[in-house]
Image (spheres, rainbow, N blue to C red):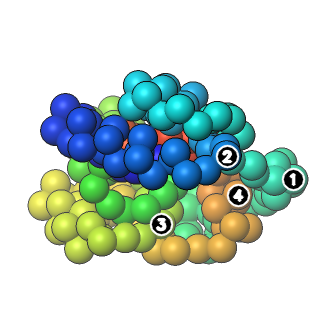
Amino acid sequence: LLPHMEGVTDPVTDFVQRFYFEYYDAVIAPSSKAVSALKRAKVKTNVTLIHNGIKLDPFIHADASLFRSTYHISKNTRLLVLVGRVDHGKNIDFALRAMQKVVEKMPNAKLAIVGDGLQRMKIDKLISRLSLSSHVFITGFVDKTMVASANKAATAALFMSTHDTFSTVAM
C-alpha cells in the first residue's frame, strides 16, 4: 500500500496502485483501512487482510520496575508512556501541550517518550519551551524488553498517531 496525503495525491496513488498490483496474484494488507484504500483505488488483484503479528509473552511477563529504576521514576509517580518514532504524524507536540494541563492537576506526573526519530531535536526544543523538562523525557531507541517494561510501568499509554495503518504500538 502506497502512502498518500488525504485529498491531495489520492488519484495519483490510486492509479499507481492499480497499475502496480495488477502484476501480482495476491496482495496482503496489514489493516482494514488498507483493504478499504485498495478497494477504493479499484485494485482488481485479490486482497487478503493479515494483521501484523506480535508476541505477547514479553509484555505479559514484563517487569515494570526495570523501566522505573532505569529512568529513576518512583512508584508514586503517574507515568504516561508514548511509544514510537519521534516523527511527523505522531502528534507528539499535541501530547506535550496536553501534558502541560496534566502537570497542573498532577505535579508528579511524567511523560516518557520511548523512541527516537527525525523530529527529536524539534521535540526536545518544544519540551524546553513548554517548561516540561522535569516532567518529560525521551529515552531514544530501546530494546523490546524495555518497551514492554515501559508499558507495564505506565499509568496510561498514549497513542497520538494519525498515520498508522495497523500499529503494533497500540497492541
> Mark 2 near mark 3, Cβ–Cβ under 8 Å?
no
Identity of the residue drawn at 66% across and 73% down: 143
**Disc 3 versus disc 1: distance between alpha carbons?**
21 Å
* 144 is higher (above) or lower (below) than 23: below
Q: Secondary structure at mark 2?
A: loop
* 113 is higher (above) or lower (below) than 167: below
100 and 148: which is toward the camera: 148
Q: Earlier in the sequence, mark 2 or mark 1?
A: 2
**Disc 3 versus disc 4: distance between alpha carbons?**
13 Å
On residue 57, which mark appears? 1
The amino acid sitting under disc 4 is Ala
* Viewer-nearest of discs 2 and 1: 2
Q: Quadrant of residue 66?
A: bottom right
Q: Earlier in the sequence, mark 4 or mark 1?
A: 1
What residue is pinned by disc 2? 25
Q: Earlier in the sequence, mark 2 or mark 3?
A: 2
Identity of the residue drawn at 24% across and 43% down: 12
Percent x, y for residue 139? 47, 71
> Mark 2 near mark 1, Cβ–Cβ under 8 Å?
no
The amino acid sitting under disc 2 is Asp
Q: What count of labels does the image hold?
A: 4
- The reply to whether residue 161 is in sight is no
Q: Secondary structure at mark 4?
A: helix
What residue is pinned by disc 4? 148
Q: Is residue 85 left or right of residue 14?
A: right
Identity of the residue drawn at 24% across and 36% down: 11
What residue is pinned by disc 3? 115
Q: Earlier in the sequence, mark 3 or mark 4?
A: 3
